[in-house]
C-alpha cells in the first residue's frame, strides 16, 4: 500500500474527527451545565444539514447557509429548552433524556413529510471543490481542509468565550456549583437557556459542514448521535478537552479501519470504547463519580 | 368496600383537638373500585383479559403482536420500572433472541421449545456480557452505553451476512409443528398461535411476579428508590442491577424468539434503535413499574400504528407528540394516571 494513501486516509479521518468534535462539544457543554443528555442532538445536526440545503436551494449561496443554519438551529434549541426541557428541571434525570428522545422522532418525521426519504443533493461551493496539491504527491480535497480549519476556529472561539469572557466565567462556575452561582444573584436558568442554544447551534453548523461530504437524508443524525455518544463517553462526559481529543481519535480509528478492513469500519469505535471503559471507566478526562 | 375514609381540611376540627381536619366517608364510583381491584390482582385480570382479547380486536394477528410486544415491554420494565435503569438498547436482546431462535430452527434442530429456550438464553447471555460494561456507569452514562452497544450489534448483524442474511434479513424460518407429549400440533393458525404465545406470556408474568416478591425483588426496588441506602444496608447494588438487567434481557430474548416464529422471518431492523425506541415508548405510555402498564402501552402503540399506517406512512408524527406530552404531563403513563385519578382525594 502506498504511504501517500495512508496519509490521505489520516487526513480524511481528521476531517471526520472534526465533525465528531463539533457535535461532541455541543453535547458536552449542554451536559456539563444542564446535566441533560440531548438525544435530539443528532436530529438537530440533521436539521442543520436540511436548513443548509434549503438556504442553498433558495439563495444558491453556501456561505449564507453556513451562517443561517446555526442561527436557525440555535434559535430552535432556545425554543425547545424554554418550552419542553425547562419544565423538567428538578424531576428525575431520566425525563429530559426521554423527552429529547421522543423529540427526535418528531423531527425526523417532519423532514420525511416535507423532503421525502431520499438523499438530498448538496455539493461543496465551487471555490472549495478543487483538490489542493502539496509537494505534487498529496491531493487534499480543499473542502475537507476548510472543514478542519473552521472547526479549529470554532474551538478557539469557544475557548476564548469560556475562558476569557464574563459570561464564560459564569458558565464555568455554573458547571462547578450552580447553587453557589445562584446565591450570587445570577439567574442560572437564563444561562442554561443560552448554553442549550449554543450547543444546538454547534449541532446546526456541524450539519451544514457535514452535508457536502456525507449524504443528507432524514436518518443521517441517528448513526452520528450514537457515534458522538461514543466519543463523549471515551473523552469523559462534560470534558471539552476530552471531547476534542476523543473526537479526533475516533475519526482516525474509523478512517484507518476503512482502509485496511472496511467491514469493521462501523464497529471499531465501539471496540475502542469497550477497551477504554474497561481500563478507565470514567473516560480519558472524565471525573469519576460524576452524576452517578 | 362502599366508601373510602378521607380527611378534609377544615377549620372546625381545631377546637375539638382533631387538628385541622375532618373525617368523612367519601363515595367511591364503580370504576374506581374496578381500578383498585385490578391493581391489587393484576395477574388474574391480565389472564382473564387476554383470553377474551383476541375476539375483540380487529384481527387476531394484531392481538398476537400486542402480547409479544407487551412481553418485550414487560421484560424492559424489569429494567426501567422496577430497577430504575433507563436502557435505550433493548433492541439488542430482542434482536439476538429473534436471530438465535431463527438460526437454531434453520440450522440446528427443528424444535420450537429448544429454539425459544436458545433465544431466551442468548438474550440473557448478551445482557450479561454487555451489562458488565454498562452497569459500571449509572444514569445518563448507562442510557448512552446501552444505545451504543445495541448499535454495535446492529452493525455486526448487518455485516455478518452468512449468519444473519444481512440487509435481507433471516428468511425461510421453517413452520415446525409444536411437539408436546409425543403429539405434533400445528400452531400456525392465528388463534392457536395467539394462545401459544399467551402460554409464554403467562409463564413470564408468573416468573417475574415471583421474582419481584422474593427478597431479591425487594432489593431491586430498594435500589431504584435509593441506591446508596441499599448499598449501606449491605447489598452489592451493582450486582443486583446486573442481575435485573440479565433477567430483563432474557425476557426480551424470549419475546424476540416468539416474534421470529410469528413472522417466520427476522429483519435487521429488529436490532435497530427504532426497536429500542418502540419499547421505551410503549413502557412509558402504558406506565412503568406495573404489570399492566407495558401491555396497555403495547396495545395503544400498536393499535395507533395499525390504524394510522393505513392513512399515512408518517404515523410517527402523531405518536411522537403523544410520547412527548406523556413525558411532560403524565410521567406515570396511562395506567399510572388512571390509578392516580381513582385514588386521588376529592377536594
Image (tube, coloured by chain):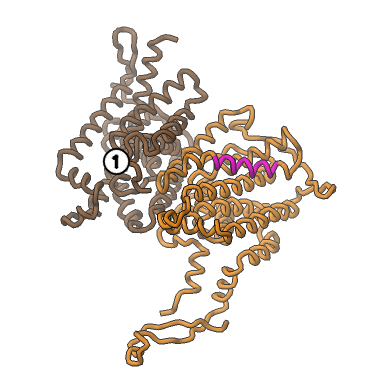
Chain colours: A brown, B orange
Q: Out of A53 and A242, give the one closest to the viewer.
A: A242
Q: Please state the horizontal and vertical placement of residue B275, each as a whole percent of the image.
A: 54, 45
Residue at 69% x, 46% y: name it. B262
Stretch in magenta: B115-128
B121 is within the stretch colored magenta: yes
Q: Residues within 10 Å of mark 1 (few under 14, many from 20)?
A: many
x and y percentages locating residue A26 in the rendered image? 31, 40
Residue A21 image position (x, y, % from top left): 33, 32
Q: Secondary structure at mark 1?
A: helix
Q: Is residue A36 above or below residue A87?
A: above
Can the viewer see residue A261? Answer: yes
The prevailing secondary structure element of the residues shown in magenta is: helix
Residue picked out by circle 1: A201
Q: Give the answer, above or below, for where A18 lies relative to B303.
A: above
The residue at the far top in this view is A136
Return the residue found at the far bottom.
B16
Q: Is residue B326 above or below residue B255?
A: below
Indicate whether residue A91 is drawn in magenta: no
Q: Is residue A226 left or right of residue B90?
A: left
Residue A67 shown left or right of residue B130 in the figure: left
Chain ID, mark 1: A
Q: Is residue B183 left or right of residue A134?
A: right
- In depth, the one of B245 and B149 nearer the eye is B245
Amino acid at each position: 500500500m502506498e504511504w501517500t494513501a495512508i496519509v490521505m486516509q489520516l487526513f480524511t479521518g481528521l476531517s471526520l474527527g472534526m465533525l465528531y468534535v463539533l457535535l461532541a462539544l455541543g453535547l458536552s457543554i449542554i451536559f456539563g451545565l444542564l446535566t441533560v443528555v440531548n438525544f435530539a442532538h443528532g436530529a438537530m445536526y440533521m436539521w442543520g444539514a436540511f436548513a443548509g440545503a434549503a438556504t442553498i436551494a433558495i439563495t444558491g449561496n453556501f456561505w449564507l447557509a453556513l451562517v443561517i443554519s446555526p442561527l436557525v438551529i440555535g434559535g430552535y434549541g432556545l425554543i425547545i429548552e424554554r418550552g419542553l426541557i425547562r419544565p423538567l428541571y428538578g424531576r428525575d434525570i431520566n425525563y429530559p433524556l426521554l423527552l429529547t428522545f421522543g423529540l427526535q422522532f418528531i423531527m425526523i418525521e417532519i423532514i420525511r413529510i416535507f423532503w421525502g426519504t431520499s438523499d438530498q443533493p448538496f455539493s461543496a461551493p465551487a471555490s472549495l471543490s478543487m483538490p489542493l496539491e502539496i509537494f505534487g504527491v498529496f491531493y487534499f480535497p480543499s473542502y475537507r481542509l476548510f472543514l478542519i480549519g473552521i472547526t479549529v476556529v470554532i474551538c478557539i472561539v469557544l475557548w476564548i468565550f469560556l475562558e476569557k469572557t464574563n459570561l464564560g466565567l459564569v458558565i464555568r462556575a455554573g458547571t462547578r456549583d450552580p447553587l453557589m452561582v445562584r446565591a450570587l444573584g445570577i439567574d442560572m436558568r437564563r444561562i442554561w437557556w443560552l448554553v442549550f442554544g449554543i450547543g444546538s447551534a454547534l449541532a446546526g453548523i456541524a450539519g451544514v459542514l457535514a452535508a457536502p461530504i456525507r449524504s443528507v437524508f432524514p436518518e443521517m443524525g441517528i448513526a452520528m448521535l450514537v457515534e458522538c455518544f461514543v466519543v463523549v463517553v471515551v473523552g469523559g462526559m462534560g470534558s471539552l478537552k476530552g471531547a476534542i481529543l476523543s473526537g479526533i481519535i475516533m475519526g482516525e480509528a474509523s478512517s484507518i479501519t476503512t482502509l485496511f478492513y472496511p467491514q469493521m469500519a462501523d464497529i471499531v469505535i465501539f471496540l475502542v470504547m469497550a477497551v477504554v471503559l474497561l481500563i478507565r471507566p470514567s473516560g480519558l478526562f472524565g471525573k469519576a463519580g460524576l452524576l452517578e | 368496600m362502599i366508601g373510602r375514609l378521607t380527611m378534609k381540611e377544615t377549620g372546625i376540627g381545631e377546637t375539638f383537638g382533631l387538628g385541622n381536619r375532618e373525617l368523612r366517608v367519601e363515595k367511591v364510583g364503580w370504576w374506581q373500585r374496578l381500578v383498585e381491584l385490578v391493581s391489587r390482582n393484576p395477574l388474574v385480570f391480565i389472564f382473564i383479559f387476554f383470553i377474551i382479547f383476541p375476539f375483540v380486536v380487529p384481527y387476531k394477528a394484531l392481538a398476537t403482536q400486542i402480547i409479544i410486544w407487551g412481553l418485550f415491554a414487560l421484560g424492559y420494565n424489569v429494567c426501567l420500572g422496577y430497577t430504575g435503569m433507563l436502557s435505550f438498547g433493548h433492541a439488542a436482546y430482542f434482536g439476538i433472541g429473534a436471530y438465535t431462535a431463527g438460526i437454531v430452527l434453520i440450522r440446528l434442530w427443528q424444535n420450537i421449545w429448544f429454539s425459544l429456550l436458545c433465544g431466551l438464553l442468548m438474550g440473557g447471555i448478551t445482557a450479561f456480557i454487555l451489562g458488565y460494561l454498562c452497569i459500571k456507569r449509572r444514569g445518563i452514562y448507562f442510557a448512552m452505553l446501552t444505545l451504543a452497544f445495541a448499535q454495535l450489534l446492529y452493525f455486526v448483524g448487518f455485516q455478518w451476512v452468512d449468519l444473519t442474511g444481512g440487509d435481507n434479513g433471516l428468511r425461510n424460518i421453517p413452520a415446525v409443528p409444536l411437539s408436546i407429549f409425543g403429539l405434533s400440533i400445528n400452531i400456525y393458525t392465528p388463534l392457536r398461535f395467539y394462545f401459544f404465545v399467551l402460554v409464554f406470556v403467562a409463564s413470564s408474568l408468573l416468573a417475574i411476579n415471583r421474582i419481584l416478591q422474593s427478597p431479591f425483588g425487594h432489593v431491586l426496588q430498594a435500589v431504584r428508590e435509593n441506591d446508596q441506602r441499599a448499598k449501606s444496608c449491605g447489598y452489592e447494588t451493582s450486582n443486583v442491577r446486573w442481575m435485573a438487567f440479565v433477567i430483563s434481557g432474557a425476557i426480551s430474548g424470549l419475546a424476540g424468539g416468539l416474534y421470529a416464529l410469528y413472522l417466520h422471518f427476522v429483519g435487521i431492523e429488529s436490532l435497530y434503535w427504532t426497536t429500542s425506541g418502540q419499547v421505551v415508548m410503549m413502557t412509558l405510555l402504558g406506565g412503568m413499574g406495573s404489570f399492566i402498564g407495558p401491555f396497555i402501552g403495547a396495545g395503544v402503540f400498536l393499535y395507533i400504528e395499525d390504524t394510522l399506517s393505513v392513512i399515512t406512512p408518517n404515523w410517527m408524527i402523531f405518536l411522537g407528540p403523544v410520547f412527548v406530552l406523556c413525558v411532560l404531563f403524565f410521567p406515570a403513563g396511562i395506567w399510572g394516571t388512571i390509578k392516580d385519578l381513582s385514588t386521588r382525594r376529592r377536594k
